[in-house]
Structures are given as C-alpha cells and as structure tokens.
Amino acid sequence: MKHYNIAEFETYRPASNDNTDGRSTRQPRLLKSAAILLALSFLIVAALRFTHMSDQTLGDEIAWFAGLFFLGCTCLSLMATPRGLKGHWAEVWSGRAFLAGVAILGASTLVIGVDLH
C-alpha cells in the first residue's frame, strides 16, 4: 500500500484569479477570449458579405458593433496586464466591455437566425 504525504495535500490550493503576491491573473485569459470572439465577429461579417446575405439581415452590422466591444476589451486588457492590480480601472472596464460584447454577439446570432430562417 502506498503512503501519502499529508503535507502535499495541505498545501494544495485551487486555481484562482490571484498570484501569490495578490496580483491578478485574470487579464491574460480575458485577453485571449476577447481575441477569439473578435475573430468570430469578423468571421460572421465576412461570411454574410461573401454569401451576399448582408443585405437581408442586420446581423453583420450588429456583429461589427460586438467586434468594437471586443477590440476595446482587448486594448483595455493589454493596458491592465502589466499593472496586474486588482480593481484597476482598465481591468474593470475590460470585463464590462467583454460582457457587453458577448451579449451583443449573442443578439447578432439571434438576429441572423431569425432573419435567415
């Protein structure tokens, strides 16, 4: 039977948004997510333009608007990452821009689905 070292289990801490020095690690993950969703917004716009369906729906215009929020989130995340301070204004506003972009992108896909169905 294998014996386990109890000290190893006591030092285990679940992953969090903080480093050991109290600095935030949230921004790199938010930056990566915003960049991926920005690319998805551009993909929606390009697909609707390429298939000549952009005249039939407002989905591409709404996707452009969502892309602007993701671009803003990306810029704010890049500003907040070197500082790493929790509660910094750039960190707070990048989270808000990300949530607004996700909501607008969801509305875009809903509009596309309704208009082209």
Image: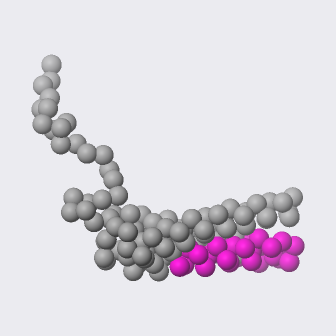
Image coords of residue 87 (percent x, y) = 38, 69
**Range of the magenta residues?**
46-72
Residue 26 quadrant: bottom left
Q: Going by the image, does 101 lie left or right of 95?
A: right
Quarter of the image for the C terminus: give it: bottom right
Q: Quadrant of the N terminus?
A: top left
The part of the image, by quadrant, that contains residue 91 is bottom left
Q: Depth check: 2 or 25 in front?
A: 25
In the image, 4 versus 22, the foreground residue is 22
Q: Residue at x 77, y 71 (%)?
A: 59
Q: Report x, y in % for residue 77.
A: 43, 74
Judge whether residue 7 can be spotted in this image.
yes
* Residue at 68% in and 78% down: 64
The reply to whether the magenta stretch includes residue 62 is: yes
Q: Nearer the viewer, residue 100 or 46?
A: 100
Q: Main secondary structure of the magenta part?
A: helix
- Determine if the magenta segment contains residue 84: no
Q: Residue at x 14, y 24 (%)?
A: 2
Q: Position of residue 110 (x, y in %)?
A: 76, 60
Task: Name the colouring of the figure.
Answer: one colour
- Is residue 43 visible in the rendered image? The answer is no
The percent coordinates of residue 58 (x first, y second) are: 80, 73
Tell me the residue at 87%/73% (across/down). 56
